[in-house]
Image: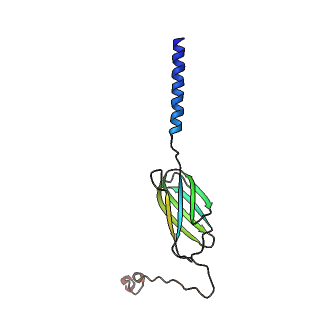
């Protein structure tokens, strides 16, 4: 009778330790907040964004792949597993833009990402002014190889 009682007490103690250790485990996924910052007040609004997270070591393609609708220029992506990711974001709607970044997502960091949007305005006929970027180093006249 004594060995049976000893085995029963040990089994009860061991089973309670397993339950205690399961309760103490931390969650293995985190929430990521993406903030879109408008540089210009007249920027067209961002209606929706298509966001994808790809693992940096190429073991998981499309870990997160969804369309989100930002509120107050903020989007919260729930339950992202920790790791290093390629993050890609397509702005949809009247403001079209693609933004990409490589970043870590884990419990130790603040998982708040900020992206600055480029200038974008609604088209009004007769008000378009083209932005001209002139690179003097790439002109044929300034390149000595073009005279050979």
In the visual, does 57 lie left or right of 146?
Answer: right
Position of 95 relative to 107 (above/below)? below
x then y, percent, for residue 8: 54, 19
Residue drawn where x is 59% and y is 87% of the image: 127
x then y, percent, for residue 87: 52, 60
Visible residue check, residue 72: yes
Residue drawn where x is 63% and y is 86% of the image: 125
Residue that sits furthest to the top in the current view: 1
Visible residue check, residue 63: no
Q: Nearer the viewer, residue 50 or 58?
A: 50
Residue drawn where x is 54% and y is 57% of the image: 53
In the visual, does 144 lie left or right of 118?
Answer: left
Position of 8 relative to 18 (above/below)? above
**The N terminus sits in image quarter:** top right
Residue drawn where x is 61% and y is 88% of the image: 126
x then y, percent, for residue 14: 51, 26
**The C terminus sits in image quarter:** bottom left
Q: Nearer the viewer, residue 62 or 2?
A: 2
Colour convention of the picture: rainbow
């Amino acid at each position: 009778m004594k060995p049976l009682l000893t085995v029963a007490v040990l089994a009860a103690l061991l089973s309670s330790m397993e339950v205690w250790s399961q309760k103490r485990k931390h969650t293995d996924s985190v929430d990521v907040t993406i903030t879109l910052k408008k540089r210009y007040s007249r920027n067209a609004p961002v209606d929706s964004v298509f966001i994808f997270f790809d693992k940096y070591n190429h073991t998981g393609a499309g870990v997160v792949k969804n369309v989100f609708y930002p509120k107050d220029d903020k989007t919260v992506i729930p339950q992202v597993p920790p790791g290093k990711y390629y993050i890609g974001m397509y702005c949809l709607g009247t403001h079209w833009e693609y933004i990409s970044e490589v970043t870590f997502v884990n419990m130790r960091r603040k998982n708040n990402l900020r992206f600055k949007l480029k200038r974008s305005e609604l088209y009004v006929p007769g008000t378009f002014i083209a932005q001209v970027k002139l690179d003097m180093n790439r002109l044929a006249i300034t390149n000595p190889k073009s005279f050979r």
